[in-house]
Image (cartoon, grey):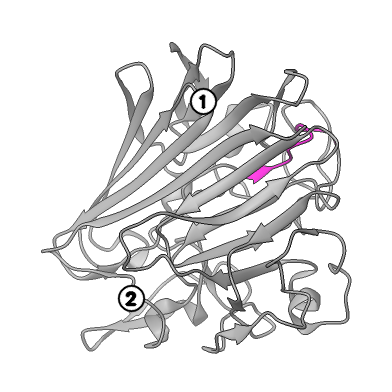
Amino acid sequence: MNVKIDTVATPHGEVTTFKLTNAMGASVTLSTVGAGIVGIEVPDRDGVLADVTLGYRDLGEYFYDGPCAGKTPGRYANRIAQGRFTLDGVEHHLAINNGPNHLHGGPEGFSHKNWQGECQGDDTVVFTLSSPDGDENYPGNVEARVIYTWTEDNVLKIELWAITDAPTVINLTNHTYFNLAGEGSGTVLDHTLQLAADKWLPTSDSLIPTGEMAPVAGTPMDFLEPKKLGRDIKADFDALRFGKGYDNCWVLDAEGTGDLIEAAELVDEKSGRVLRVFTDQPAVQVYTGNWLAGAPVSKSGHEYQDYDGVAIECQGMPDAPNHDNFPSQVLRPDDEYRRVILFAFETTN
């Protein structure tokens, strides 16, 4: 494994990138901004490498970007209704930064921080962040860590870890947008997706879960069998109207098992690239890049359009602090938050 480390000055401070390249020539490039992924180059069925992640030409644009491209949102990924939750009898009020709700930890959340990064060996990069008590009005001093490991067989392992000195809530994920045909190649609506989920979370029109876990059967939310992302995206269905496409959460069976399950498989038939996603998280949010137009200039120098990438975000359930029937995202001082996500890249014939 070859490691290349670069440091670039930006208006928000120096950003360090780490590029890990395996013996096959496939690589992952990571950044201290949001402990994020800024590039993954993997081969197609003919062995031709392409970057399959969306991102920006200017590293400084990763700070405070709307799409949260490639980064680690937190303390709480996804939405919390009206920015409010009650923990141990105390109501906490968070920033409102997504319609009437709190999103991805707020306007100064984990994804906008410049984390500390260092290599461990030649295949692993560890990012660390200290989040003080009251950070974005969350309680407790939190120490967070994101560990990336890149393998010789094109698997990216992401380990998410946190501890706290006071009860708090936490929900970490990775927010990479994938286009398996290659960044800059246009829409992903012809990609095929399969999800290991027979239930999903219906929401209000501001994308807050109602608390119901509804069957996918007979709805456009059914991805139990492989289906093109674009097949039903314009269907006359509330969830798709609310988000202008898929921006929804599906229920997985991984929570509490201690085992990884295959949550999703994404396929680009044209290139033959396949992404298999494994996790021990209780849910997966799929977002088809419905509002990508207007994002910063892309790595390839063009303007992104809506639906140019899809994010497959393994995570805790949105607004879980306000739903007793959802798996808890409460972290207490005697506990450790530990979650794993694997992105495994393969090809078809």
Q: Quadrant of residue 320?
A: bottom left
Amino acid on which the number 1 mark rests in the picture = Asp
Give the labeled residue for mark 1: 153
Give the labeled residue for mark 2: 328
* Figure check: 304 above or below 50: below
Q: Which quarter of the image is occupied by the N terminus?
A: top left
Whichever of labels 1 and 2 marks the residue nearer the N terminus, that label is 1
Q: Position of residue 197 (x, y in %)?
A: 58, 70
Between 313 and 59, the residue placed more toward the observer is 313
Disc 2 residue crowd, few under 14, some 14–19, many 20+, Cα 10 Å = some
Amino acid on which the number 2 mark rests in the picture = Ser
- What segment carries the magenta color? 176-185
Q: Are marks 1 and 2 in contact (CB under 8 Å)?
A: no
Q: Position of residue 71 (x, y in %)?
A: 51, 44
Which type of secondary structure does the marked residue at label 1 adopt?
loop
Which type of secondary structure does the marked residue at label 2 adopt?
loop
**Residue 2 inside the magenta-drawn segment:** no
Q: Residue at x 77, y 34 (%)?
A: 272
Left or right: where 222 falls relative to 132: right
Q: Is residue 176 visible?
A: no
Q: Residue at x 53, y 26 (%)?
A: 28
Q: Position of residue 131 (x, y in %)?
A: 28, 51
Left or right: where 116 falls relative to 224: left
